[in-house]
Image (tube, rainbow, N blue to C red):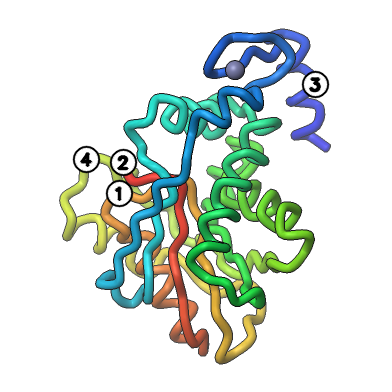
Amino acid sequence: MLQKIKTFLLDFLLPRRCIGCDRPDTWWCEECFRMVSETPTVSMDEAPLDRLIVAAAYDHPLIKRAISALKYQGRTEDIAPKLGLLLTRVLNEQAPSPCQTLVPIPLHSSRQQERGFNQAELLCQAMVKHSSGVLRLNSALLKTKETLPQVGLSRSRRMENIRGAFCLGSEIEKDSHYILVDDVVTTGATLKECARVLKKHGAKEVWGLVVARN
Ligand SMILES: [Zn+2]
């Protein structure tokens, strides 16, 4: 509800303009979205993640702009569905098996309240829609510890900062395959810590799927 009011006000105060061509009434028009193609990179040595899939290149100006518009400017409409479509296509290529559960990387509740939404959850919701419900969403993880921003920390400090920050907030099915979803990955410390928690509670296989690596 709050998000709807925010969107309404944002549309009123700041009419939508495409992040690519500036045309009105959309944050990302179909034509500009077609200029972005999936360029997935897959890495297998990110234990405890079994696989890390990065869908597109962060240095593509439209990807960079889309992520920043979504996350920092709250332009969730048009942008979350399109990034979700990109992720769905990449996941279908990488994992033809349909029975997977998406788990968004959570924000701490105070951060989520401040932002009004969790961008990773919006991406998952879009993916569920694009897959016609074949993909399932389980917001199983909670972030219970407030952490320092990972930006600017060394690799080892990032691991230390994020360690113990997540716990399971709802049941997960044991021996299942989970896909952790986020907008960007840097060192992967957050995704790995979340994978560790899911595996500790019986997940059989955990992949990470993100839009881009910055
Ligand atoms: Zn455009």
Quadrant where the N terminus is found in the figure: top right
User: Hey, what amino acid is under mark 1?
Assistant: Thr
N-terminal label among 2 and 1: 1
**Disc 3 from disc 2: Cα separation:** 31 Å
Q: x, y percentage for residue 44?
A: 30, 71
Label 2: which residue?
Answer: 214
Q: Are marks 4 and 3 in contact (CB under 8 Å)?
A: no
Q: Earlier in the sequence, mark 3 or mark 2?
A: 3
Location of mark 4 (residue) = 152
Q: Tell me which image quadrant ligand 1 sits in.
A: top right
Residue at horizontal 74%, vertical 25%?
Answer: 6
User: 200 and 143: which one is in front?
Assistant: 200
User: Which tag, 4 or 3, sits closer to the chain's start?
Assistant: 3
Q: Tell me the element at label 3.
A: helix
Depth check, front residue: 67 or 61: 61
Circles 4 and 2 in contact, beta carbons < 8 Å: no
Q: CA distance from mark 4 to mark 2?
A: 13 Å
- Quarter of the image where one finds residue 49: bottom left
**Quarter of the picture holding the C terminus:** top left
Residue 186: mark in rendering: 1
Q: Circle 2 — which element?
A: loop
Residue 113 x %, y %: 63, 41
Q: Amino acid at mark 3?
A: Phe
Residue labelled with disc 3:
8
Asked if the residue at tag 1 contacts the one at tag 2, i.e. Cβ–Cβ closer than 8 Å, the answer is yes
Q: Alpha-carbon distance for marks 4 and 3?
A: 35 Å
Q: Secondary structure at mark 1?
A: loop
Amino acid on which disc 4 is placed: Gly
Real-space Cα separation, disc 4 to disc 1, in angstroms:
11 Å
